[in-house]
Image (cartoon, helix red, strand yellow):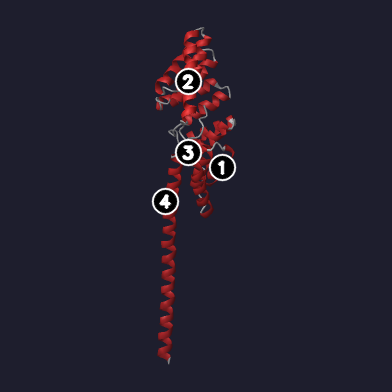
């Protein structure tokens, strides 16, 4: 009887040990599967954003957030809201992402863009500054901060940022267009025309650059050139509207 009791206890311990091992295995394996599923869903959400399917992306990242809130999910859902020009909702998500991870420069850049489009210029300057402190090479931050500074009538500071932006990104037409706007606002129309011309060279169908160059020509009394550019601007704008051309990206802050 004693032997049978000991054998029964050994079998019971063995069963308990097997259950414990199986439970740990299931937990670890199940966690791995869930992690792989989340990564796959995140990749699908990013692909949806890149192809302009913002509503689909927002739904995907909302599901991910409900299952396992992470800063990166809030960030990408914020990008989705930005695509839809819902900057108030985007800012809320960027706020959440930043509260969970204060050291990611791209979070501040995206929130800064939404703040800039919302007319909160000083707050956007602060975000771009923080992004540059975290990562001095973060793409776009100097150019975006230059736009916000110009909106605050800080033209000299804006020009300094544009110098840095153009030195690292010399093929971005919006940077030259913005510098042209700064020169034009200061009455330096010849310099403005040079910058608008460079913007047009980089992007042939830039309606805003044609329009603004036309105004600069008009201010110099060059009526023929002004009319040519203004007519060109209207033609380009009409073509883009009728053809439905668009990048699927959030509206540019300039």
Circle 1 or circle 4, nearest the eye: 4
Closer-to-camera residue (66/31): 66
Reply above or below: 57 against 187.
below
Measured Cα–Cα span from mark 3 to mark 2: 36 Å
What residue is shown at x 43% (from left), y 20% (from top)?
200
The residue carrying mark 4 is: 40
What residue is shown at x 45% (from left), y 36% (from top)?
135
Reply above or below: 32 against 133.
below
For marks 3 and 2 on the same chain, the one whose residue lies earlier in the sequence: 3
Q: Position of residue 70 (x, y in %)?
A: 50, 49
Number of the label disc, if any, that sits on residue 235 = 2
Circle 4 or circle 2, nearest the eye: 2
For marks 2 and 1 on the same chain, the one whose residue lies earlier in the sequence: 1
Circle 1 SS class: helix
Furthest residue toward top: 221
Q: Position of residue 156 (x, y in %)?
A: 52, 20
Number of the label disc, if any, that sits on residue 106 = 3
Q: Do labels 4 and 3 touch, CB within 8 Å?
A: no
The residue carrying mark 1 is: 95
What residue is shown at x 44% (from left), y 40% (from top)?
50
Circle 2 SS class: helix
For marks 4 and 3 on the same chain, the one whose residue lies earlier in the sequence: 4
């Amino acid at each position: 009887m004693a032997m049978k009791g000991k054998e029964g206890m050994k079998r019971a311990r063995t069963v308990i040990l097997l259950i414990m091992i199986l439970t740990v295995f299931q937990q670890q394996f199940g966690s791995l599967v869930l992690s792989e599923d989340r990564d796959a869903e995140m990749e699908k959400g990013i692909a949806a954003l890149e192809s302009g399917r913002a509503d689909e992306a927002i739904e995907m990242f909302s599901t991910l957030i409900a299952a396992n809130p992470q800063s990166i999910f809030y960030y990408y859902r914020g990008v989705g809201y930005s695509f839809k020009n819902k900057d108030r909702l985007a800012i809320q998500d960027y706020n959440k992402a930043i509260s969970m991870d204060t050291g990611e420069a791209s979070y501040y850049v995206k929130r800064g863009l939404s703040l800039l489009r919302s007319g909160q210029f000083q707050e956007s300057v602060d975000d771009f500054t923080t992004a540059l402190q975290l990562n001095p090479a973060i793409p776009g931050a100097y150019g975006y901060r230059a736009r916000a500074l110009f909106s605050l009538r800080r033209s000299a500071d804006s020009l300094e940022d544009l110098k840095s932006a153009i030195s690292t990104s010399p093929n971005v037409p919006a940077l030259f267009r913005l510098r042209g706007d700064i020169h034009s606002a200061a009455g330096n129309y010849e310099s403005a025309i040079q910058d608008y011309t460079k913007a047009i060279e980089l992007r042939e169908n830039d309606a805003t650059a044609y329009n603004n160059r036309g105004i600069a020509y008009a201010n110099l009394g060059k009526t023929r050139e002004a009319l040519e550019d203004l007519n060109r601007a209207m033609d380009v704008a009409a073509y883009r509207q009728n053809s439905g051309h668009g990048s699927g990206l959030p509206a540019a802050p300039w």
